[in-house]
Amino acid sequence: MKKKVLLMGASGSGKTSMRSLIFSNNPASLTARLGATIDVEQNHVRFLGDLILNLWDCGGQDAFMDSYLTTQRSTIFQHVGVLIYVFDVEVNDMKKDLEYYRDCIEGLRQFSPEAAIFLLVHKMDLSRDRAVSFDRKSKELRTASQNVDVNIFATSIYDESLYKAWSSIVHTLIPNAAVLSRHLAIFARACSATEVILFERTTFLVIATSSPTPPSSQGTASPRPEQLDPNDIHQLESTRYERTSELIKAFKYSCSRLREEFQSLELELPDFTAVLDEMTKNAYVMVIVHDPTIETAAIKLNIKMARRKFE
Ligand code: GTP
């Protein structure tokens, strides 16, 4: 099953940079070397089972945009699962950007009316007051979108916000996410775990969790919501998923520099134990246990026994 993802936005807004971080495991510091994308660069990423993401990174220079919206219109906008449109938070005059954006929405309405739309207000690290600039841009974008349903995220390649947005994006493309969550909840109970999280192998984006609320529904407003949920007995941070993705990606990058392959991870801390291990060919599972009487070896054995069920 192939899902087409369109990545669009003005030249220099940061599209290829985010693609290179998420899908190629490159560090943010190397993105300054990237050249402008010529026309469309396509990538295929195999996700869980037979789900393949077909990512179209569309170069944002005016000549290319004009061509997507005219001669290539049907090729670009048909069979789209998700449109991701990237806006540079530092660009004050959005007039031309918004004209192209509205035209793209029109193209989608014509050829892929069911597609989900994600708007990323990007390079938030450059903004002095993140909350204020995000609020202002979001209002502008909602007005430009008129009645179309859009999901807006604040992102930067220099923190975990990018993983939050992209996890939410892929979550909309996974057909059996709710079923997976139910199975993870059963598995969590079997392990006496506080939480179990499933990550995609290459990107380390969150596929599903054992918690009832999926990562996608955890709000899009604040770029760095550090609050703790007062109802949660273990005081889990609301940013834990995207922060784990970011940390593990950085760790994997360090391993690759040492020519070592990342395989699994065990953390035994005074408050909790965390085990990260392979669950299927395309996914890793992280099991978080707060009960000190549960042995790490038992968690690993449970993961081993559950593999067949999840493959
Ligand atoms: P085209 O290929 O021409 O459409 O451009 P693009 O949207 O792919 O832009 P690209 O990813 O090449 O990024 C342009 C510049 O923005 C690079 O120098 C990146 O390092 C920088 N950049 C990307 N994301 C961020 C970010 O989150 N923060 C900051 N400060 N810079 C970023």
Image (cartoon, grey):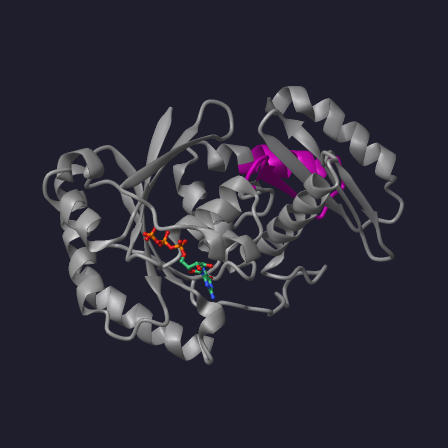
Question: Looking at the image, which is closer to me, 210 or 140?
Answer: 140
Question: Residue 195: x, y in percent?
Answer: 67, 46
**Does the magenta run of residues contain 194?**
yes
Residue 5 is covered by the magenta coloring: no
Residue 145 position within the rendered picture, expressed as x and y whole percent measured from the top left: 20, 60
Q: Which residue is drawn at 55% across and 68% down?
A: 225
> In which quadrant of the rendered view does residue 310 lie?
top right
Front residue (pair 1, 6): 6
> In the rendered image of this protein, does residue 177 appear above or below residue 101?
above
Instruction: Tell me: 144 left or right of 5.
Output: left
Query: Which quadrant of the rendered structure holds the C terminus?
Result: top right
Please say whether residue 214 is visible from this viewpoint: no
Up-down relation of residue 66 to residue 41 (above or below): below
In the image, taking residue 44 as reference, residue 182 lies left or right, namely right
Please, is residue 46 above or below residue 87 in the view?
A: above
User: Magenta part of the protein: which range?
Assistant: 181-203
Tell me residue 305's x, y (percent).
Answer: 74, 23
Q: Which quadrant would the N terminus be assigned to in this image?
A: top left
